[in-house]
Amino acid sequence: MIATAVGDVLPIAVTVAISPVAIISGVVLLLSEHGRAKAVLFAVGWIVSLLVVTGIAVAVTDVAEEDSPAATDDGVKIFTLILGLIFLGLAVISWRRRPAPGEPASEAKLLARVTAMSGLSVLGLGLVEAVAIVKNVPLSLGAGARIAEDTGNRSEAWIVLVIYVLIASLGILLPLLIAIVGGHRLDPALNNFREWLEANISPITIITCLVVGVYFVGKGLAVFS
């Protein structure tokens, strides 16, 4: 049951992890004064938010499934289908709003303020970014519903929930781990990585929304079988 549930939410977790704005925020913090400590606080805020949002979906779906298993199963599939259509719509919107060649994305302009934040502000930033990035909340709600559907009991559900959140946080945790292990000699590489992400926020967002939309639509269409 656990392996099935992890396999089912793995693509969703990877999609949440591929959040360019959050990754850039973490890298910018790493390159700032007291960067390692700030990046840890940012990661903690991110993880807590994802745990809460996904945990709510797990709990609600679990209770509903106890009352009406068949209706809950169909409800999860319909919800998944709706999410897929929403993400396909977001892909279209992102495509139409993409910046002109050579023009920086609007998100990149806002990240200049991150380096001046205090430790408490950085913690708050992690809490907010995890839910403010458009795709994260619906993805985590969808993941929570799938976790509750795929697991046999609450203990299994919470184990999968933790695994999901950790994978969904890899975009932030991996640069932090690299910085801690590699030290400041890797700062130039991290800075180059940040610049590449800033230059490619728009295409990454479009491709991510498109892939997620197709994935969710495919899962949701099972309601008609």
Image (cartoon, rainbow, N blue to C red):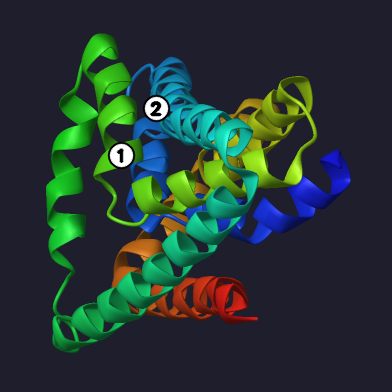
Q: Is residue 214 toward the left or the right of residue 198 in the image?
A: right
User: Residue at coordinates 35% horizontally, 57% vertically from top-left?
Assistant: 135
Compare marks 1 and 2 and give the one earlier in the sequence. 2
Where the C terminus falls, by quadrant? Answer: bottom right
Q: Nearer the viewer, residue 32 or 3?
A: 3
Q: Position of residue 86 (x, y in %)?
A: 31, 71
Residue position for label 2 = 49
Residue 213 seen anywhere in this rendered image of the structure: yes
Q: Residue at x 71, y 23 (%)?
A: 154
Q: Is residue 189 visible?
A: no
Type of residue at label 1?
A: Val
- Quarter of the figure with residue 221: bottom right
Tell me where residue 122 appears, x and y as whole percent.
Answer: 28, 21
Seen in the picture, residue 193 relative to 163 is either above or below; the reply is: below
Residue 87 lies, in percent from the top left, at 35, 72
Please give the label number shown on residue 131. 1
Mark 1, Cα crowd under 10 Å, few <14 / some 14-19 / many 20+, is some
Considering the image in quadrants, where does the N terminus appear?
A: top right
Q: Nearer the viewer, residue 143 or 209?
A: 143
Asked if labels 2 and 1 touch by Cβ distance under 8 angstroms, the answer is: yes
Badge number at residue 202 = none
Question: Which quadrant of the view contains residue 94?
Answer: bottom left
Residue under the image location 40 percent in, 73 percent down: 209
What is the number of callouts on the image? 2
Q: Is residue 28 left or right of residue 157?
A: left
